[in-house]
Image (cartoon, grey):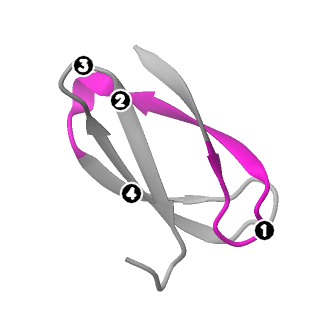
Amino acid sequence: MLTPYSVQCPYCGEPIELLLDASAGDQSYVEDCPVCCRPINVRVGVDGEGDPWAQVAGENEG
C-alpha cells in the first residue's frame, strides 16, 4: 500500500508529495523534484507503529 507523504524540496522549497511503500522497509533512492527537476536523495523508513517516514536532502547533503 502506498502512503502519501508531504515534504519540501531541499532546492526550491516547494511542497511535493512522495508515495511511500511501508512494505518495502528501509530504503534510499533518488527522485527528481517535479517542480525544479533537481535530484533529491530520499531516505524512507518505517516507525515502530508501521507508519512510513521520509527524509529528503540535496544531492551533496547528508
Is 14 situated left or right of 42 in this image? right
Residue holding disc 3? 50
The image position of residue 49, as x and y in percent, is: 23, 17
The amino acid at mark 4 is Tyr
Badge 2 density bin: few <14, some 14–19, many ≥20, Cα 10 Å: many
Instruction: Report the Cα–Cα distance between label 4 and label 2.
Output: 15 Å
- Sequence-wise first label, 3 or 1: 1
Residue holding disc 4? 29
Query: Is any atom of residue 41 visible in this view?
Result: no
Circle number at residue 44 = none
- Tell me if residue 34 is in the magenta stretch: no
- Sequence-wise first label, 4 or 2: 4
The amino acid at mark 1 is Cys
Residue holding disc 1? 12
> Which residue is painted at 67% across and 60% down in the image?
9
- Tell me if residue 9 is in the magenta stretch: yes
Q: Is residue 50 above or below residue 28?
A: above
Instruction: Report the Cα–Cα distance between label 3 and label 1.
Output: 30 Å
Work out which residue is located at the far front of the displayed protein and give it. Answer: 48
Tell me where the magenta segment starts and ends, as one range. Answer: 7-26
Instruction: Report the Cα–Cα distance between label 2 and label 1.
Output: 24 Å
Residue 43, quarter of picture: bottom left
Residue holding disc 2? 52
Q: Is residue 20 above or below residue 28?
A: above
Badge 3 density bin: few <14, some 14–19, many ≥20, Cα 10 Å: few
Q: Nearer the viewer, mark 4 or mark 2?
A: 2
Q: Secondary structure at mark 1?
A: loop
62 or 23, which is in the foreground?
Answer: 62
Badge 1 density bin: few <14, some 14–19, many ≥20, Cα 10 Å: few
Q: Secondary structure at mark 2?
A: strand
Badge 4 density bin: few <14, some 14–19, many ≥20, Cα 10 Å: few
Q: Secondary structure at mark 3?
A: loop
